[in-house]
Image (cartoon, rainbow, N blue to C red):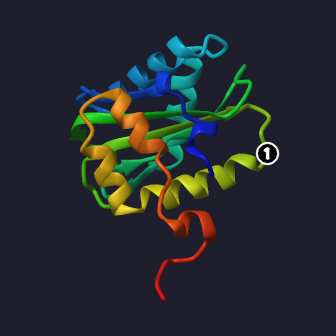
Amino acid sequence: MKMEKILSPELTFCNVQCVSKKRLLETSAELIADQVPSVDANQIYNALIAREQLGSTGLGSGIAIPHCRVPKCESTIGCLVKLETGIDFDAIDDKPVDLLFYLLVPENTIEGHLEVLRNLAERFNDSEYCASLRSCSSSADLFKAATADLSLSDQSGQTGVA
């Protein structure tokens, strides 16, 4: 999966300050709605909260992939947020989260987003990839690192081990 298909520079935010999960979801919904006029910040926030009530999207190792269906969302939208300081996100390992990738999909999407979620989880499971994101100091650098081609294993399905 090419990250550029769902992520744009305008939806990549570096060194965001936030102190709680609820406030972060609210802030992120506003950031997304500011860049995507067809979606409403309150609807995004409510959908994200409803999804989090089903179970945390905090994967562990400082990573979360909040995702939801959103009314008036016309296509899959990605938003990458790197926090200045990690926050409690109810992650499965109870560690603070500092990297979040939001995935918003049209309300009537059935299955296509599950493959995108799987690909995102695989990408964020790569410690080198996450380290490259964490080392960024600007949103432009963060977008560049997020969209950089991964190792040959990502492109060929091989692990690179002979």
**Residue 13, image x and y in percent?**
37, 27
Q: Is residue 104 above or below residue 10?
A: below
Looking at the rendered structure, the kind of residue marked 1 is Ile
Query: Taking 7 as reference, is 106 left or right?
Result: right
Q: Is residue 54 above or below residue 18?
A: below
- Judged from this view, the residue extending furthest toward the bottom is 162
**Residue 125, image x and y in percent?**
42, 62
Q: Is residue 158 above or below residue 117?
A: below
Query: Taking 98 as reference, is 38 left or right?
Result: right
Quadrant hosting residue 87? top left
Query: Taking 89 as reference, is 26 left or right?
Result: right
Q: Is residue 131 above or below residue 24?
A: below
Q: Which residue is mark 1?
A: 110
* Residue at 32% from the left image edge and 36% from the top image edge: 82
* Residue at 31% from the left image edge and 61% from the top image edge: 93
**Residue 152, image x and y in percent?**
52, 67
Secondary structure beneath disc 1?
loop
Quadrant hosting residue 118? bottom right
* Residue at 51% from the left image edge and 77% from the top image edge: 159
